[in-house]
Each structure stands twice: as C-alpha cells, then as structure tokens.
Image (tube, rainbow, N blue to C red):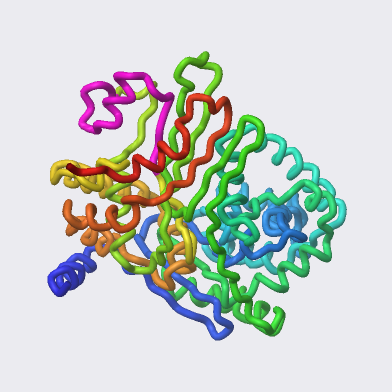
Amino acid sequence: PRRMQSNQAAVKVNTPETRVTQLANGLRVASEDSGISTCTVGLWIDAGSRYETNENNGTAHFLEHMAFKGTANRSQLDLELEVENMGAHLNAYTSREQTVYYAKAFSKDLPRAVEILSDIIQNSTLGEAEIERERGVILREMEEIEQNQQEVVFDYLHSTAYQGTSLGLTILGPSENIKKINRDDLVKYIKQHYNPSRMVLAAAGGVEHDKLVNLAKEFFGTTVSNDSYEATPLKLAPCTFTGTFFRHKIFFVICHMAMIKFRIQMLQVKANYNHFCKVLLNLTSMLVYSTDVTNSKLMIKFQIIGSWDRSSTNGAHFPNPLVRRMAREGLCVSFQSFNTLYTDTGLMRLCTELTDLEVSRATNTLLTNMALMLDGTTPICEDIGRQMLCYGRRIPWPEMARRIAYINVNDVKKVLGKYVWDACPAVASIGPTEALPDYSNIRAKMYKVFH
C-alpha cells in the first residue's frame, strides 16, 4: 500500500543502510555501518546438506570442521594464535541450506579478518592427518547428538516428511559416510559448491562499505573466480513433501506437508516425571517466503502461541490462555512455537476466536523480541548474510516493523484459515508415547463444527 511505502521511506533515514555491491566474479558484498568500534564479518555460502546426495551426505559439515585446521600460509597453531592475539573470535556452522564462516573483531582489524577468512576458504591444506582427527571428532559429536532427543526427532521428521529428497538428509550425515570421506571428496565439494556467485561477504558494526568492497576485490576478487569451479550451474532439486506414518519402538512420526511447526514437550499423563515424550506438530503449506507479508502474519501467530517452561514465573494468571492451562493442569514440562524456513518449502481456536487484544499484545512482543535479536554486530551480520542468500536483499528493520505494525486480527485469521484450518498436521513423538492422542483425534481438532 502507498501509505506503508511512504511510512517506510520516512523511517529508513533513521537506520543504517544495508549497502550491497556485486563483484565481477559474482560475489556479493553486503554491509551495515553503525560506526562502532567492533565488527562482525563473514562468508555466507549457498551450500549445506540439501545440496548433497546419499553418497556424500555429511561432506559440507565435515568441510566446515576442516576450515580451521591449517592453510598453505598458516598452521593451525599460527591461525589460533593470530586470532587470539587480535582479541577476535572465529567460528563456523552448517545448516541444511547454508555454510557460514565468520569472525568478530575490532573494526581496525577488519582487513586482517577478511584476509584470514579468504585464507581458510581458499587455501585450506585439508591434510590427511587433520582429516583423520576430525573424523573422530565428528563421530563423537554424532554420538552426543544421538542422546539429544530433540535433535533426533527433528532429523526423523525431515527424513520421513521429505523422504527421497535431499532435504530429508541430516546435516552431519550417516556414520558410514563420515568413516569414508576423504580429501578428494572435500576438494570435489569445494569445486562444485564454493562458487563466488553463491557467496555473500556480509559485515556489520564499524564497517565502511567501500573499504569492505576493496578488501573483497583484493582477497576474493582475483584468486576466487568462476573459472576455478564447475561450469555447470547447480540446480537445487525440488523437495516434495510426502505425508507418511513412521513408527520405531518408542518413536513415531506422522507427517503431512510441513512448514509451520509447533513443538510441545509433554509429560505422559500417568507416568513418572523421569519419562516424557516430545511431540512435534507440523502444520504445513507450500509457501514461498520472499517479501510477502504472509510470513509476518504467521510470526504473529507463533507469538500468540508463545512458549512456556514450568520453571517460568508465568503461571495461572498469565494472559496467554495456553500458558494458563499448562500451568494450572500440569500437562507439560514446556512448550515452544517456532518456524523453519527453506527456500521453496517449508491451535484451532486461533482460526475462529482470535481477539484484537491478543493480536495487539503479540505484535508488541514480537517487535520487542525481533529488535533484541538484532542487538549486536554478529546477529545483524547473520541477518544480512541469510537474507541476501534467501531473498536477494536485506529487508530493513523499519520495513519489517511497519509490516508487522499494520497487521490486524482479520489478517491473521485469514492466513490461519488458509494454511492451518482443516489441515493435516505432522506429528513426531519420541519417548513413551502411550499418552499421545490418536492421530485421527489430533486431525479432527484441526477444524470446528458450528451449529
């Protein structure tokens, strides 16, 4: 709407601009300069477990582990000492769609931070001895994750909901793959996926954009070129959602097209407190989250559901009706609402009895939480890098805030009616599941019969 556009234009002058420059080799440089004495700079790469196959699943994460194990210019010890002497922090992580390497340092050390990032990305030695050491580290990490039921249930959900597609693969990969991944596999993965056209050099804090662009040209613009990578552009295969039912001992998953997720850690009604089951309700829809306001409306919905833990001070008199019931009746240990967005895919009272007060309260809370999440150079840098890869631009905070502020109760009801009402949920449970209602009962509560 014109009114929203004019308001956006008016408030944008009060926030630092996210400047974007694309180099000749396709690398995008994006930054927000707040003029402070520290900064975060990192490389966001369109590469993760979704870009793998059954045969090489786990390679992206393995490669991330190898990033800090020495380069042609620095040994692992030299790298660690240099970063520590700068008073900086160097880190990395892998998700299903992205791999990220970033550094947090003083603004005066930005050139050294960018040079170090370019060195570990382009010149890692990938030594055989280091590969064998990290192989053991990753296998131990997998053993630890297997003890985390929340991680296990989420991986099972992906594998059954997106079965037969790369989105169903785990980030760490199966142990049999980890045991056989070698240097050639890592080099091949770099050659295929670490293409500058699929990278974003993002920075936030005390960062002069023109200076960052020059650093990118110096350290990434010449040695990193499309000629070094496979000529055939990578096409991400669509990940079709498959409704299915899966049961394994004390674990079962019932799925339908999943995008919106509502997770509950639920106590078995008549069980000892040492035994519990985790339930993941997956409400789904095929949504393309570009710059459409649908996502903002769904974010309001998640805020209305909220979250709660039995150790919380919020209890029987809290405004949230779900919190009140959980606190009064002791139905669960905790619950949490959240959403997971992918590039192309991704409870019933809210559709019919939502009030203006609930939406207003949720809107204010959401705006506060989002503002707090962007408090610091690292979360801002992450926001820039992630949005550049997902949307091709950074959605400024004032624009997002205005979108949320204009949402009313009818907007939320309309979206819930389209994507939630009478939809088949996906349910995943781990632990003693005897107290979990039958799936048909859960499905029946996704709509309400009016007389």
Q: In this view, does 176 lie to the left or right of 449?
A: right
Bounds of the magenta span? Answer: 314-337
Residue at position x 29%, y 19% from top? 328
Please provide percent x and percent y for residue 73: 75, 64
Residue 335, image quadrant = top left
Going by the picture, which residue comes out furthest to the front?
451
Q: Note whether residue 149 is visible.
A: yes
Residue at position x 38%, y 73% from top? 19
Q: Note whether residue 100 is visible.
A: no
Residue 324 forms part of the magenta stretch? yes
Image height check: is 263 above or below 73?
above
Q: Quick one: quadrant of the C terminus?
A: top left
Please provide percent x and percent y for residue 17: 32, 69
Please provide percent x and percent y for residue 312: 35, 24
Image height check: is 294 above or below 336?
below
Going by the picture, which residue comes out furthest to the right?
128
Please name whichever residue, 98 or 267, is drawn nearer the observer in this view of the structure: 267
